[in-house]
Image: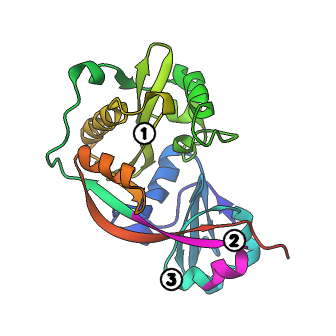
Amino acid sequence: MLLTAALPSTDWFSPERPGATVLPAHVQRSSHGGWWADDPSDVRALLVHCGPERLLAGDPSRLEPGILGRFGRGQFHAPDRFLPLLGRTFTHLTPWVRVLHVYVEQPRRRVSPHTAAWVRPLRPGDETLLDRFASRGVLAPDGPHWTARTWGGHGAVAASGFAWGAFLGPYLAAVACGYLVGREHIDLAVATDPAFRRLDLALACIQAATAAAHTHGLVPTWSAPDSNHASRALAAAAGFRPLRREVVYWAGPALTR
């Protein structure tokens, strides 16, 4: 059963911790994504999905490859007991280590007032600028920029109230947004147009995002691959410190049956 209405008891993901347990609250906040349960009246296995993110919990014996394979390619946050099921479902299962950071207001690199002045919250009218920003990205994907996929697209993230951009003339040069926004935490994502790197624009956007997060009573977090030294250095410059390492799994496509 695929649903987007209220999730089963929040006891499944309480207390909310930094990381993937923010996903269910984000689904409810954004109205994007949904959840699957083996039996909504007596849940034993649960999958929450939003954009490319998938969160598994419960008893893997209650979930079949034919159901799991419907979700296609994605990043799975799952206990080890789900690995045999994932292996029977997808042609590829690639583990990678990411480092979860939390904002602690430690000494951070200053951004010049001139640079900070280029940053403002995104608004619904900025959707076309996000379209162009995505087309100029390194990967230039067919679809929304990766930072917007957990919101359902550029229009949704621009109207979310959780996105900030650095504007240079007619260009959106960098963006930071709440990739996953929970009840207590906000996991931030940031990207820069390749033509405007090394100008501290991403750092200025992140600093605006963390300041706004505090006004919403949210703890900012940052997730980065262990091997992405540039992202981890930017996190440190913005006042984040490593909290823990965790393994996630890129999976797909589904096996043909």
Task: Locate residue 52 relative to residue 244 in the image: left or right.
Answer: right
For the residue carrying disc 2, how many other residues have a C-alpha within 10 Å: few (<14), some (14-19), or many (20+)?
Answer: some
* Mark found first going from the N terminus, 1 or 3: 3
Q: Which mark is on residue 142?
A: none
Asked if one can make out residue 43 in the rendered structure from this viewpoint, the answer is: no
Residue topped by disc 1: 177
Farthest residue, direction top: 169
- Contact check, label 1 and label 3, Cβ < 8 Å: no
* Mark found first going from the N terminus, 1 or 2: 2
Q: Where is residue 248 in the image (x, y as percent from the top left)?
A: 50, 69
Residue topped by disc 3: 80
Nearer the observer: mark 3 or 2; the answer is 3
Q: Which amino acid type is marked by label 2?
A: Leu
> Which SS class for mark 2?
helix
Q: Position of residue 142 (x, y in %)?
A: 70, 40
Farthest residue, direction right: 257
> Which SS class for mark 3?
helix
Q: Where is residue 128 in the image (x, y as percent from the top left)?
A: 60, 22
* Mark found first going from the N terminus, 3 or 2: 2
Question: If the image is split into quadrants, where does the N terminus sit?
Answer: bottom right
